[in-house]
Amino acid sequence: MASELVIKNLHANIEGKPILRGVNLTVRQGEIHALMGPNGSGKSTLSNVIMGNPKYEVTEGEIWFKGENILEYSPDRRARMRLFLAFQYPMSIPGVSVANFLRRSLEAVREGNKPLEEGENPTGKIGKRRTVPPVSSANCCKRK
């Protein structure tokens, strides 16, 4: 099975302070991984480094995604490869439904940013619900 995400000997700093030291991770196509650990153990830091957050400086190592070394890619380019962060407590934006947010996100990554046609529903599920559920599947309330 092909590897989707490969991290090799990743080291990163923030403001000159080492925060990741020698991280290795391989996620193959179809696998699901959970990053778990106490506060301050580096879960969010690793995610931010993978996404190319400019606050973090990669000093050593490699990050490969779908066969491409993405270390020099901008966060926007990484997002267009469908690599992104989802927040545990997303902020509520008045007037923006989950369906519209997902629809616009899909448009952003489609080739040439071609907008969806009226009534087009490529996921088969977007657009079925008109309101945002007040509680997520993880039983956490939305941040207001």
Image (cartoon, grey):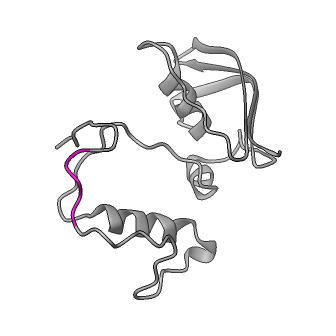
Work out whether 59 lies above or below 21: below
Q: Left or right of 71: which side holds 74? A: left
Q: Position of residue 144 (x, y in %)?
A: 16, 44
Give the quadrant of residue 114. Answer: bottom right
* Residue 58 on the magenta segment: no
Q: Main secondary structure of the magenta part?
A: loop
Q: Left or right of 30: which side holds 54? A: left
Q: Left or right of 138: which side holds 76? A: right
* Quadrant of the snapshot with the N terminus: top right
* Residue 132 on the magenta segment: yes
The residue positioned 57% from the left and 40% from the top of the image is 51
Work out whether 144 lies above or below 46: below
Q: Left or right of 18: which side holds 100? A: left
User: Which residues fall within the magenta stretch?
Assistant: 131-135
Give the camera-side residue of 57 and 100.
Answer: 100
Work out whether 28 lies above or below 34: below
The residue positioned 57% from the left and 47% from the top of the image is 75
Give the camera-side residue of 24 and 57.
Answer: 24
Give the quadrant of residue 8. Answer: top right
The residue positioned 33% from the left and 43% from the top of the image is 137
As drawn, the residue found furthest toward the bottom would be 118
Give the camera-side residue of 137 and 93.
Answer: 137
Q: Position of residue 77 (x, y in %)?
A: 62, 54
Q: Position of residue 101 (x, y in %)?
A: 36, 63
The residue positioned 63% from the left and 21% from the top of the image is 12
Q: Position of residue 63 (x, y in %)?
A: 73, 35
